[in-house]
Amino acid sequence: RRMATLQGRVLGCDGLAVPTSECLCGFLKEGVVVVISTKSSSGEVTNEARTSVKTGGRSLQWEPSALGAVFNFGNVKMGDVVEVVVINKNKGPDVVLGSATIPVAAVPFDQAEFTLSLGYSRRLSSLWRSASNGSVTLKLAVQAHHNWL
């Protein structure tokens, strides 16, 4: 079995989409959580971690000591993907601000920094263009086990 360990850290989010107060009053007041998971080629979640809740606006940074900011996933396969979902923790249902994926095969053995786009909003901006949902920045590295390649 070709497995490895995926190690990483959530550094922060930048340019998070914040609707106008007419859309959702109090948006982002409850804070943001980043959920990191690995998924198999069949879509099954094989590992998952969540950062602590962070408040403060459109650009947020997590300290290395923050709960969930550092993660270490075992039994990761070359064909798996890393999925990152940024969630606004509201008093009501959680709102997904955006998500991104990266293939495990694209993660190097030496820790590297990745800034991933969270996609574009389906709501049109005032200029009739899609608006960016922002980005999330992570540090990732794969520690290969025997027969990884």
Image (cartoon, helix red, strand yellow):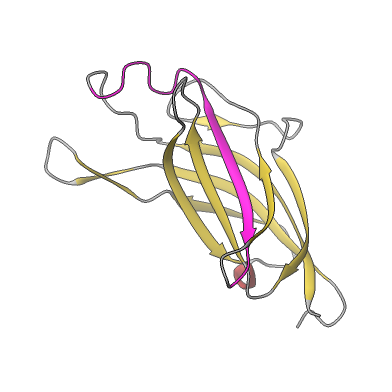
Looking at the figure, which quarter contains the C terminus?
Answer: bottom right
Image coordinates of residue 28 in percent, x first then y, are 43, 23
Tell whether position 34 is magenta.
yes
Image coordinates of residue 100 in percent, x first then y, are 48, 54
Instruction: Identify whether 13 is placed above or below 57.
Output: below
For the residue pair 1 and 16, the one nearer the viewer reads as 1
For the residue pair 39 and 134, the one nearer the viewer reads as 39
Image coordinates of residue 44 in percent, x first then y, are 61, 63
Residue name at image x 51 percent, y 59 percent: 101
Q: Is 22 situated left or right of 28 in this image?
A: left
Which residue range is magenta in the image?
Answer: 23-41
Q: Is 79 situated left or right of 24 in this image?
A: right
The quarter holding residue 121 reads top left
Looking at the figure, which quarter contains the N terminus?
Answer: bottom right
The quarter holding residue 20 reads top left
Residue name at image x 78 percent, y 79 percent: 2
The quarter holding residue 19 reads top left
Tell whether position 39 is magenta.
yes
For the residue pair 56 and 21, the one nearer the viewer reads as 21
